[in-house]
Image (spheres, grey):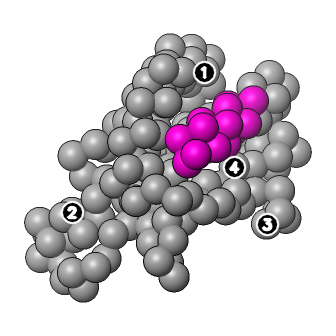
Amino acid sequence: MNPEETLYAVESDKSVTGFVEDFAAVAASNGFVINNRATMDMKKTFQAHGGSVSEDFDLHMIQICKPTKADKSLAANPERAILMPKFVHVFTKNNRTQVRYLGYSPAYIASMVKDDSAFPDSLAQTFGTIRAMIDEARK
């Protein structure tokens, strides 16, 4: 797996909270839902379970899904589920909002879910859509 093909790393002039809100709106307009809205703020989640992080810790792990696509995909082959959770990670580093997203090439997808010729291109298309949504939300 080549990091240049899988890791999407960009910055935004928006605050973490501003990016998260804008990303949620862009995702919704594209038919995606945020599955973990109540738990994506990792500081709050860690604290709720007895964890301790510094006051300025601001990592948000946004799990997104497109139910109207995922339902058909997973019904066709539940082995696809291993690659289905999609997370956009947002945090501050060097006083800049950082956004990270991990996607996979069709070849890697095919190596993970064997004998499923339709899945690699379909999932790669979704990865591209998510990158475009990140770009729209960060500006």
Q: Relative to 50, is 108 on the left or the right?
A: right
Residue 25 visible in the snapshot:
yes
> Which residue type does callout 2 highlight?
Thr
Identified by mark 1, the residue type is Ser
Residue 26 image offset from top left, x and y in percent: 49, 30
- Nearest the viewer among 139 and 106 is 139
The residue where tag 4 is placed is: 103
Tell me the tag on residue 45: 2
Which one is closest to the eye, mark 1 or mark 3? 3
Q: Earlier in the sequence, mark 3 or mark 2?
A: 3
Who is closer to the viewer here, 24 or 51? Answer: 24
* Crowd tier of the residue under label 4, counting other residues whose Cα lies within 10 Å: few below 14, some 14–19, many 20 or above: many
N-term-proximal mark, 4 vs 1? 1
Q: Where is residue 91 drawn, in percent x and y?
A: 44, 67
Q: Are marks 1 and 2 in contact (CB under 8 Å)?
A: no
Q: Is residue 105 above or below residue 92?
A: above
Q: Secondary structure at mark 1?
A: helix
Q: Which residues are magenta?
A: 125-139
Q: Main secondary structure of the magenta part?
A: helix
Q: CA distance from mark 3 to mark 2?
A: 29 Å
Q: List the residue tagged with mark 1.
A: 73
Sequence-wise first label, 1 or 2: 2
Residue that badge 3 annotates? 3
Check disc 3 and give the amino acid type.
Pro
Kind of residue indicated by mark 4: Gly
Q: Earlier in the sequence, mark 4 or mark 2?
A: 2
